[in-house]
Amino acid sequence: MRFLVYRTSQGATSADPPCRGAVRGAESPAWPGEYQWFVELKSLDDLLAFLRNNGGGLGLFAPEADEEHPAIEIFDDDEEE
């Protein structure tokens, strides 16, 4: 399954990949030079490995009416509280 992936600190589009293995999608029309990023995860085991490899904190969101893919938000562990 293909997921949109992004980091809390970068937002839904960014110039840099949010994680290792992310594949760049189309350029954002609203933010030139920034892109959506995607990962392909085939199983629950893949999702758990992705969780472990990316800091242990993720949000998983179903696609909304105008979206094609579910989204994974990587919660940055260096966020100020």
Image: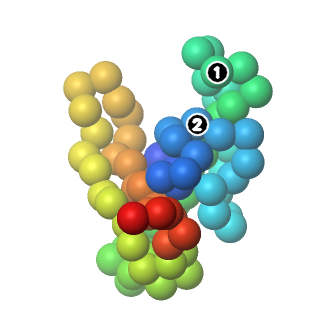
**Residue 45, image x and y in percent?**
39, 83
* Residue identified by numbered label 2: 13
- Determine the residue located farthest toward the top in the rendered image: 29
Amino acid at dot 2: Thr
Q: Camera-side residue: 27 or 14?
A: 14
**Are dots 2 and 1 in contact, CB under 8 Å?**
yes
What's the colour scheme?
Answer: rainbow
Q: Secondary structure at mark 1?
A: loop
- The amino acid pointed to by label 1 is Trp
**Whether residue 11 can be seen here:** yes
Look at the image and tell me in which quarter the C terminus lies: bottom left
Tell me which corner region of the image, top left, top right, bottom left or bottom right, holds residue 56: bottom left
Percent of width and height locating residue 42? 43, 68
Residue 49 seen in the current view: no
Q: Residues within 10 Å of mark 2 (few under 14, many from 20)?
A: many
Q: Which mark is residue 63?
A: none
Q: Where is the N terminus found, in terms of image quarters?
A: bottom left
Q: Position of residue 21 (x, y in %)?
A: 67, 64
Residue depicted at 69% across the width and 52% down the height: 17
Residue in view at x 64 percent, y 21 percent: 31
**Above-or-below relation of 3 to 53:** above
Seen in the image, is 65 located left or right of residue 75?
left
Q: Which residue is mark 1?
A: 31
Tell how many labels. Answer: 2
Crowd tier of the residue under label 1, counting other residues whose Cα lies within 10 Å: few below 14, some 14–19, many 20 or above = few
